[in-house]
Image (cartoon, grey):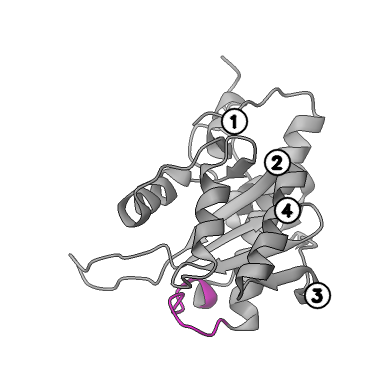
Amino acid sequence: MPPTRKPPTRAEIAEFEPFAGLELDRISLITSQTAAEAAFAQLAAAKWIGFDTESRPTFRKGQHQDGPHVIQFSTAERAFVFQSARADTLPVVLRILSSPDIHKVGFGLSGDYRQIQQRFGIRPAATTDLDREFRKLGYRDALGVRSAVAILFGRRLLKSKSTATTNWASPRLTESQLRYAANDAYAALRVYQALRDGAIGIAPTE
C-alpha cells in the first residue's frame, strides 16, 4: 500500500497560476441532430474522452432532483455540451454513454451514474472514476478535478461557485456555464492523460 498523501490546501491552490482550459471557440453547444452526429464522430475517434454532468441545484430537503440537465464530453481539442431536454440530440448522448468503445473518464461519477440510471434507464459503459486512481496513489479522500489539476500540473482550475449553482435546466446556457461544464470534462481528460503518461496503468472500472 502506498504512503498516505495529502493534496494541496485551498490556500495553496489559490496561489497557483490558472489552468489553461478550453476557450469558447473550442466549445460546442449541440443544438441539432446533425451537430450531434458530428460530435459523436469526433468523440468516437478519440476513444478516451472527458465526461461530466451538471444538474439544476436543489435547495430544499426532499426536493426532487430530475437531472442531469447538461451532459458534457471532451476530447483533447474540443468539448461538446449537450442539454438533456433536447429530444433531437438525446439519442446521440445515450449512444455515447452506452458505447463500450468510447472510454469516458471523470471524477466522482457515482452520482452521475445514479442520475443517468434514474432518468434514462441506462448505466454508462466503459467509464473510469479518477478518484479511484488517486486512492491507489495514496490519496485517501475523494479529490475532485480541482485538486487533481493542482497535484499534477501545479495549476488552479477556475471553478466558480456562483456558476456551479446556476440553473442548468435553462434552455439558454450562458458563456460562463459553457466554460464551466466544458472544462470540467476537459480537465478530467488532461488528468487521465497525465496519469497514463506517468506509466500508471488505468483500465475502465465500470
Range of magenta residues: 163-173
Q: Quadrant of residue 24?
A: bottom right
Q: Amino acid at mark 4?
A: Ala
- Disc number placed over residue 111 in the picture, else none: none
Disc nearest the viewer among 1 and 2:
2
Dot 3 or dot 1: first in sequence order is 3
Q: Which residue is mark 2?
A: 48
Disc 1 target residue: 133
Most extreme residue toward the top is 1
Residue 92 spot, x, y in % from top left: 56, 57
Q: Residue at x 59, y 30 (%)?
A: 133
Labelled pair 1, 2 in contact (Cβ < 8 Å) = no
Secondary structure type for disc 2: strand
- Provide the secondary structure element on which disc 3 rests: helix
As drawn, the label of residue 25 is 3
User: Which of the marked residues, 1 or 4, is nearer the chain's N terminus?
Assistant: 4
State the residue at coordinates (72%, 40%). 47
Marks 3/1: CA–CA distance: 31 Å
The amino acid type of the residue labelled 3 equals: Asp
Question: Which of marks 2 and 3 precedes in the sequence?
Answer: 3
Looking at marks 1 and 2 on the same chain, the residue that comes earlier in the sequence is marked by 2
Sequence-first disc among 4 and 3: 3
- Residue nearer the viewer, 93 or 133: 93
The residue lying at 48 percent from left, 42 percent from top is 124
The spot of residue 142 in percent (x, y) is 49, 41
